[in-house]
Amino acid sequence: MAAYLQWRRFVFFDKELVKEPLGNDGAAPGAAPASGPSASKFLCLPPGITVCDSGRGSLVFGDMEGQIWFLPRSLQLTGFQAYKLRVTHLYQLKQHNILASVGEDEEGINPLVCPQVKIWNLEKRDGGNPLCTRIFPAIPGAEPTVVSCLTVHENLNFMAIGFTDGSVTLNKGDITRDRHSKTQILHKGNYPVTGLAFRQAGKTTHLFVVTTENVQSYIVSGKDYPRVELDTHGCGLRCSALSDPSQDLQFIVAGDECVYLYQPDERGPCFAFEGHKLIAHWFRGYLVIVSRDRKVSPKSEFTSRDSQSSDKQILNIYDLCNKFIAYSTVFEDVVDVLAEWGSLYVLTRDGRVHALQEKDTQTKLEMLFKKNLFEMAINLAKSQHLDSDGLAQIFMQYGDHLYSKGNHDGAVQQYIRTIGKLEPSYVIRKFLDAQRIHNLTAYLQTLHRQSLANADHTTLLLNCYTKLKDSSKLEEFIKTKSESEVHFDVETAIKVLRQAGYYSHALYLAENHAHHEWYLKIQLEDIKNYQEALRYIGKLPFEQAESNMKRYGKILMHHIPEQTTELLKGLCTDYRPNLEGRGDREAPGCRANSEEFIPIFANNPRELKAFLEHMSEVQRDSPQGIYDTLLELRLQNWAHEEEPQVKEKLHAEAISLLKSGRFCDVFDKALVLCQMHDFQDGVLYLYEQGKLFQQIMHYHMQHEQYQQVLTVCERHGEQEPSLWEQALSYFARKEEDCKEYVAAVLRHIESKNLMPPLLVVQTLAHNSTATLSVIRDYLVQKLQKQSQQIAQDELRVRRYREETTRIRQEIQELKASPKIFQKTKCSICNSALELPSVHFLCGHSFHQHCFESYSESDADCPTCLPENRKVMDMIRAQEQKRDLHDQFQHQLKCSNDSFSVIADYFGRGVFNKLTLLTDPPTARLTASLEAGLQKDLLIHARRGT
């Protein structure tokens, strides 16, 4: 039970008398009074008002004359005669423009005649008055009684009437029509019925019935109408009401001792409001009660109300949710309290209407702020559905108030409620003092839980944890179960924890949130746990493992070279992350570029050699840099090795690597490496592979290896004959006795005809030890061969001259003498010739039809055409190659018989005189005749052979 004596009182309503309108456009109810001579008078209702209600934009009144009056917002009072005698009850529906009334049309004792229930459709007219859609007697039985209360369901399917004899009738069906409605007695009792109310919950309809002594509820949407006894306390007339959804549609019963709230199946809370209750009304979340201070008996509500007309009556407006009195005032003889147009209207017995208009929410809050009633302001704002920005402003003011009073714990709780609306820096600045670090920590924790913290907030919170040495809170903050529960910037947290020396916590964050770089930094730079860092890299996906090995490989190689080398071997061949000590064999293997990891082994040649040899053996298609580095490393080891056996082994390894065929594209680099380390066998091998025979020759010459010089000439002289000439010049410059080597060179020169004899003699003339006996055999053989060659050439010249003379004579005869064709057979079919026939100067004859069948051209002999075509092709080839002077020079230099080369090019016409435009015509004609003669001679020469 809540005692209202402890509730605060406020003035949240403005009270004023309603004035008459100025003409047709008068002021609305509740407007400020006009001033000046034209000020309007106070509104006064007709006398004899007995009953009131409101809804659908009007206040509705019934009087003792049987009239029903309507007061709309324009305050233009209108009415009509509803009953002949009096109106006793009114009920205006809120969702339909339907009015239900109870009144008396004639005097008498007959209960069937009076009273009457009438249903009015206010939207339709009948002779200027509202249309009465239904009339039926209020009392269903024969026993006379008086109607005490009336209620109608908003769906127009239920209407309940209470009587002073304790009975309640239920009209079920369409209440606006007789044929669709059925009336039955729902309740019978011994005490007068003082209040009725329908409550709709889903598809279930309840009817609350209250008498002077009890409260019960019925389920009227079913068939059996089950009844529930709720309480043994009742109330007087008009002292019950149904709350709105903010109070869960509870039925309110205002007794003299307490105000009770009921659900359909049980009693709810109660409030101890003093005073004899006269009227209870519900208005927009407020409970309005009109009461008297001195108590009277309940029966006076029916028998002696007039005797109390001069008593002062108190109107209180209660806020049951926030537990305060929103307004309290005193009236004289209140007739009823109505709610319409967003305001309360109090009708008094003198016919005046008092308007109670609620102040706006901001005004009410300011009144509470002035009294430092922030908790009440917060509750009020929530009940008024103030937006989040408005609530945050109240929380901030409340927090500032508590902070100024020194209640820092309470202040920070209010500031926490402003998160998301108030700038965090406003709060943080207030709690930066070391003594308030606990409050700052609480605020920052909530800020992170709502995912509204930035990196600076995270830094500040972690610093608070570390200064407080609160490891449990710190672990609770960072050890979240899933990524979605992380409410802070992980990288910032790692930095702060690392700086504060909380390495284990920083490692936890880095590992669980995949900040691999920070994990490795802490392990390598702070903790110096190189084994764990290497193990962690081995668990990473390929791309991350590769990048981290490039970044931290040198550090790991310096401290744990063997393990690092093994990891690099796997990373560059067939890498699979090592999860929980076992490789993930189902995942596809990846392979890094091994050449990129060579700089890691800068100060670890032994591990570098093992790595390079592993890569060259396991992965034959390794990058070229692997083989280049391996060759350089082997050459370095060979050059610095002093033990003969080991040096020989290293020599063999280096030669084997050179012969592996991996240095064809980088020949120059391998050669430079071998020369830098004075690896002569490698140099000579590379010279030979690169066909640098001159360099091989020069190498042996520099080292005076005579036999090797001859060997090089013998092995490569065919590919480069100039080697023999260089060898002869080399031996000719030597002063010591080299006759044996000179003789060997001369034999080869003579057999291959590499040098003219005169050039040989001139070369050997510079050697004082070379006597004539050395070259005697060479000269004799050379002269004999030249004599034989001269004889052969003279014989050939004579034969060519004879042939040329013959051909010239034959050509002359063809030009000057007639040609007699004596062949008797066709050269194609060998049949006897018959006219018509075709004869050619070459001596072939053909049938015309054979010629036409086999000839390719009318001007060429079919028999001679293949041979002539070859000759013509040769001539064209000669003409195309006339300007090939570079080729001529090369052939002339490389040929054993220079004269034959010159004769060949002379025959092609290379040395012919060019016919220029500046030459005289006779010269051009002579050149043309000579060219034609050469062509004919060549054709006849080919035919003759």
Image (cartoon, grey):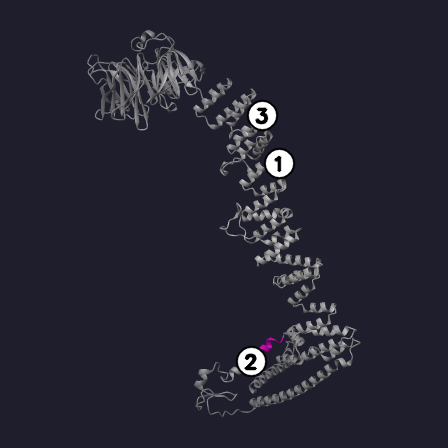
**Which percent across, then down, holds residue 609?**
63, 55
Horizontal placement of 813 versus 175: left or right? right
Q: Earlier in the sequence, mark 2 or mark 3?
A: 3
Label 1: which residue?
499
Label 2: which residue?
872
Task: Specify the quadrant of the image occupied by residue 238.
Answer: top left
- For the residue labelled by badge 1, is the local secondary structure a helix, a strand or a loop? helix
- What is the number of the mark on residue 436? 3
Measure the alpha-carbon separation of dots 2 and 1.
95 Å
Whether 237 is among the magenta residues is no
Q: Earlier in the sequence, mark 1 or mark 3?
A: 3
Q: Which quadrant would the C terminus be assigned to in this image?
A: bottom right
**Which percent across, then down, holds residue 628?**
64, 58
**Which percent across, then down, holds residue 161?**
26, 19
For the record, the magenta segment spans: 876-882
Q: Nearer the viewer, mark 2 or mark 1?
A: 1
